[in-house]
Image (cartoon, rainbow, N blue to C red):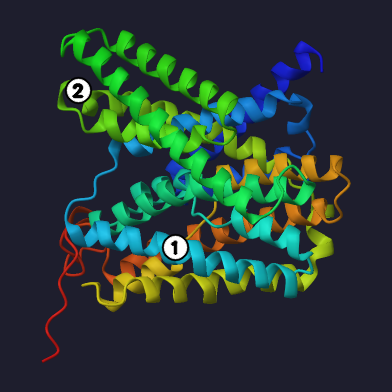
Amino acid sequence: MTPERLGLLWGVTVFAGAGARLLAALTGLPGVVLLLLSGLLIGRSGLGLVEPLDLGQGLETIVGLLVSLVLFDGGLKLRLPGDTIKNTVLRISLIRLVFSLAAGLLAAHWLAGLSWSVSAVYSAIVLATGPTVVTPLVQQIKLASPLGDVLEAEGLVLEPVGAVLALLLLELLVGDLHGWKELAMGLFARLGGGVLIGLLAGLLLSEGLKRLGPDGLVGTRLQLTLGVLFLLYGVCEWLLPESGLPASVAAGLVVGRRPATQATQLDQLIRELAQLAITMLFPLLAADVSWGELSPLGWGGITCVLVLMLVVRPVAVSLATIGLPLDIRQRLFLGWLAPRGIVTAAVASLFSIRLEQAGVLGAGRLQGLVFLTILMTVGFQGLTAQPLAKSLGLLSNEEASTGDGDGSKATSQSIPVLPDPG
């Protein structure tokens, strides 16, 4: 690819993302939905102006670095006040890890027609909700704080787990791993190793920020943070592929909880960069979607995704919240909102290439089904999240009081305890 063509690719991509952001601000429509549509417009399914694969192997590196920034930002501002919220996140994550993984495997095989092995890879890829989608939605619709915390934390916990598990299943499929024992050991090593390296990097970064002091130059603080973060991601991917994602979350958690790091000020800077990363990545990865990969799936693919949205997710949330002080309105909303995001799209694109190179049948159908999942979850759930939250009375006090002049639907900023049925 010529430098001129490369510059045009990035120029068109960033301009399309910025245009989608502007349209979202003017119309009030969910930004993530418009970002997705902008990518379809400029990519293989639309005008054909952007071809992500032209970036070659650099695509994986660019996507990985930008995603690590988004996940670091999520860890930096993640707060889980109270045991109820922590228990909710933990139980949803564990039950979805088992139940949704198995249900996704069955749905992809029986409904979408993928082989068992490719279905397992698909189920792991789409396991997690996307922080890159959930966070902008939560912020835009001004969801009451506890539910927003739960949704963001769920994505931050499961996103790295799903990516690592999908990679290991892929390696098992192409013969790089032998047996489930090696897969389990690889999962433990990459998740555990990534978290440990991330914690160490977070401590070192916190110490550096502390030495700069509260009056340290803003630019220096930001440059130090980005330097440590990108080096962390590079080292982790070199030592343990896919461990850079859990490492980024762990580093953000440590920095966000060290008071001497001035995390609030740093968070504002990182948040702006994370939003820029999302604005660049969503159109870029959506541009890779081809109608030719979606059409062979037919109604079987659509039914598979609908089952995940309308059956698997609500059942998993219902099981996870048994005995917790969540009312029916909160359970309904948690059971509905589960859009997939950038990491899902990136992993699908890269894994499809590896499967094709290995001569595995169904690589194109895997990518098509993953992008169909993203299109349907982001489209339907992104457009309905705010109306549903408003009808259920789950918006924050500030938003509810400004909407339709009726503040009676506003909920408190903490998860209410259900009354004793006795």
Most foreground residue, 182 or 349: 182
Mark closer to the chain start, 2 or 1: 2
The amino acid sitting under disc 2 is Gln
Instruction: Give the percent coordinates (x, y) of residue 298.
Output: 79, 69
Name which residue type carries label 1. Leu
Residue 215's place in the image compared with 249, above or below, is above
Horizontally, residue 12 falls left or right of residue 418, namely right
Residue 392 vertical position relative to residue 200 in the rendered view, above or below: below
Q: State the mark number for residue 256.
A: none
The image quarter in which residue 252 lies: top left
Q: Position of residue 367 (x, y in %)?
A: 74, 51
For numbered disc 2, what is the local secondary structure? loop
Q: Which mark is residue 337?
A: 1
**Residue 149 at what x, y percent from top left?**
29, 52
Crowdedness near tag 2: few (<14), some (14–19) or many (≥20) residues, C-alpha within 10 Å: some
SS category of the residue bearing label 1:
loop
Foreground disc of the pair 2, 1: 2
Taking the image as drawn, is residue 56 in sight? yes
Residue positioned 26% across, 56% down in the render: 86
Q: Nearer the viewer, residue 336 or 312?
A: 312
Q: Are marks 2 and 1 in contact (CB under 8 Å)?
A: no
Q: Residue at x 60, y 33 (%)?
A: 241
Quadrant holding the C terminus: bottom left
Q: Quadrant of residue 52?
A: top right
Relative side of 215 to 44, left or right: left
**Residue that extends furthest to the bottom in the rendered view of this protein:** 422
Task: Residue 17 in the image: state x and y as whole percent.
Answer: 57, 34
Q: Which residue is mark 2?
A: 262
How far apart marks 2 and 1 lie (CA) works out to: 32 Å
